[in-house]
Amino acid sequence: MENSVSVKDILLTFRRRAWIILVIPILLGMASFIYTHFFSSPMYSATTQVLVNQAKVKKSYLYNTNAVQTNTQLVNTYSGMASNPIVLKQAIRMSNFKMTVGQLSGMLTVQATQNNQLLTLNIQSDSPELSVQLVNHVAEALKSRVKKIMGEDNVVILSPASYTSGLSPITASLKKNVLIAVIAGFIISIGLAFLLDYLDDSIKDVHELKQLDLPVLGVVSYSARHGRNRLKNYSNVQSVSK
């Protein structure tokens, strides 16, 4: 007999595995709440942009094609210098924060926009004030080292980062994390319920016996009342086929 899944079968699966479908989302939601509220620190981002110009060039030739190409190449060079340990050490000294070069390097992201003279510096940390001060000091340290090493004063801090009260963290909020965990829990629990139901080859009710073309002689049901088993016989007992 060809097996087919009906809406009734799906609803029966939901009813039999209701505890799984309810418990897993609740547990995942609670775990997400506890982790986000007690163990996860919100992260704050601060960004500074610097403009790179070709030094010692006449004003009338500042924006010609060769100058722009040269400036673009300088942006790529200064992008590597921005994450150099020498620049980072100087930024740490300027900020007076106790941290290692490795820690600052892990917070820093340097992005050179293609065919552009802008260099973007970004710092992410668990403090908005720390992020703002560090990214500005990295930009100042880069400008200082370029002038000292390259002998060029062609780095302009175009838009320094600034701190504003009420700055929102970039990481997901508590409500969002819990909601995602609950939704994921429902998806997992429903899939697990159908998997367990598929792997369970026991006969659960008379309806499944009839689907197998087997005669039903009677149904034994268990009642916890008074701790006794009760036998319920059906009046429409079918005779066993020969």
Image (cartoon, rainbow, N blue to C red):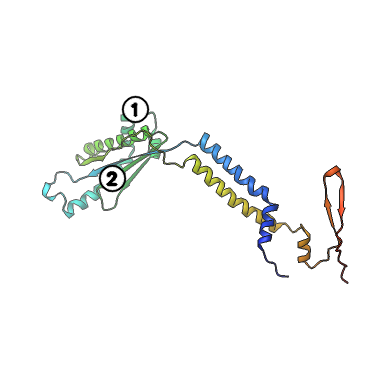
Q: Regarding mark 2 in the picture, which secondary structure is present there?
A: strand
Q: Which residue is mark 2?
A: 119
Quadrant, the N terminus = bottom right
- Measured along the vertical axis of the image, is residue 11 above or below residue 46? below
Q: Type of residue at label 1?
A: Asn
Q: Type of residue at label 2?
A: Leu
Query: Which residue corresponds to the image point at 76% horizontal and 66% vertical from the top-left?
Result: 211
Asked if the residue under mark 1 is in contact with the one under mark 2, i.e. CB atoms within 8 Å, the reply is no
Q: Which residue is mark 1?
A: 96
Query: Which residue corresponds to the image point at 60% horizontal and 46% vertical from the top-left?
Result: 25
Residue 121 lies, in percent from the top left, at: 32, 42
Residue 166 versus residue 192: which sits nearer the camera?
A: 166
Crowd rating for badge 2 (residues with CA inside 10 Å; few <14, some 14–19, many 20+): many
Q: Give residue 204's mark.
A: none
Residue 45 lies, in percent from the top left, at: 38, 39
Instruction: Measure the alpha-carbon separation of dots 2 and 1.
Output: 25 Å
